[in-house]
Amino acid sequence: MSIKFGMIGGGVMGEALLSRLIAQKIYDPDAVLVSEPSPARRDFLVSQYQVQVTDDNCLAAAATEVLLLAIKPQVFNAVVSDLAGIKVEAGQLVISILAGVPLKQLEWAFPAQPIIRAMPNTPATVGAGISAIASSNNTTEQHLDLARKIFQAVGEVVDVPETLMDAVTGLSGSGPGYVAIMIEALADGGVAAGLPRAIASQLALQTVLGTAQLLHTSELHPAELKDRVTSPGGTTIAGVTQLELAGFRSALIQAVVAATKRSQELGK
Ligand SMILES: NC(=O)C1=CN([C@@H]2O[C@H](COP(=O)(O)OP(=O)(O)OC[C@H]3O[C@@H](n4cnc5c(N)ncnc54)[C@H](O)[C@@H]3O)[C@@H](O)[C@H]2O)C=CC1
Ligand SMILES: O=C(O)[C@@H]1CCC=N1
């Protein structure tokens, strides 16, 4: 079978996407080629997903339908210079999930090819991700539909202008890291208050999951839900007062802004 879907970089995010594309039968494993320098990673991807693997990026870049770039931004230039001069199928769609790397730089690297810059996040692994996509001028509706199909396999998809991609990266791309710290800290609080670790971790995780589900299902504004939990003179307002004193809101706002700035720097 010919290779329709080539992927350069088979790490955390590449695997998250790959796992769902295979599970949902969007691509047959025989039609997928992952280029990855680590032999251990290549063996793992073969045993787990039965995809084809190689250490030659040029082979993955020759895929007929999609080339997905899932390497770190820091190796982008080196990878692109190795691809110089290879012949690709007319209309092959290039999709980059690299933080920070702008469409302008991708267009320079893949002149005349349709390109989508995307930003997924790690909940993609369990189909609960959210990805934003932005496209170059020469992408057609069919290319956008294909990109949407790929990212819908791992969760929700939003279209944004490219100017907002760094902010998306600072919020939803990096956000799972912030939320994981919050869950860990809530569990630590439970332990500090006397709970056994296992119970504290279960309570913290399900509280965050349940709150997100409730907000999602009810479409309540978060402030409205907070007001409903907060009894006059009760426990929640005592906790909220400490959060405000410690600058919890400001810390989250600053985290998103700092990550956005870092994404902008990575593209320079
Ligand atoms: N981890 C995350 O939460 C998210 C990551 N991203 C983006 O996804 C990209 C990949 O990130 P991760 O998967 O987290 O990193 P990772 O380090 O897990 O994966 C990168 C993979 O690329 C391979 N690699 C290194 N040099 C290579 C080369 N010259 N040719 C081919 N493969 C090479 C590495 O061996 C590794 O397996 C990054 O650009 C990142 O900005 C985007 C959204 C979320
Ligand atoms: O930390 C990073 O650079 C990547 C991009 C978004 C999430 N992880």
Image (tube, rainbow, N blue to C red):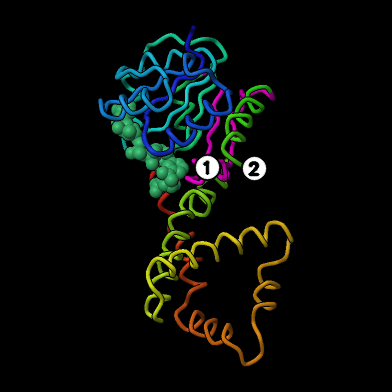
| Residue at 55% from the left image edge and 81% from the top image edge | 240
User: Between 111 and 86, which is closer to the camera in this rendering?
Assistant: 86
Secondary structure, mark 1, is helix
Under circle 2, the secondary element is: strand
* Type of the residue with mark 1: Val
- The residue pinned by badge 1 equals 126
**What residue is at 41 percent from the left and 63 percent from the top?**
181
Residue at 33% in and 28% down: 44
Q: Do we see residue 41 in this rendering?
A: yes
Q: Position of residue 236 (x, y in %)?
A: 58, 82
The x and y percentages for residue 106 are 46, 29
Establish if 231 lies above or below 150: below
Residue bounds of the magenta highlight: 112-141
Assess disc 2: are there few (<14), some (14-19) or many (≥20) residues with their C-alpha within 10 Å of its C-alpha. Answer: some
Q: Amino acid at mark 2?
A: Val
Residue 258 found in image quarter = bottom left
The residue closer to the viewer here, 128 or 145, is: 128
Q: Nearer the viewer, residue 62 or 149?
A: 149
Tell me if residue 99 can be seen.
no
In the picture, the disc for residue 158 is 2
The reply to whether the residue tagged 2 has its Cβ within 8 angstroms of ligand 1 is no
Q: Quadrant of the C terminus?
A: top left
Provide residue 2's location: percent of width, then percent of height.
49, 7
Residue 188 is situated, as x and y percent measured from the top left of the image, at: 38, 72
In the rendered image, the vertical position of residue 156 relative to residue 85, given as above or below: below
- Label 1 close to label 2 by CB (< 8 Å): no
Residue 197 belongs to the span the image colors magenta: no
Camera-side mark, 1 or 2 = 1
- Measured Cα–Cα span from mark 1 to mark 2: 18 Å
183 relative to 117, above or below = below
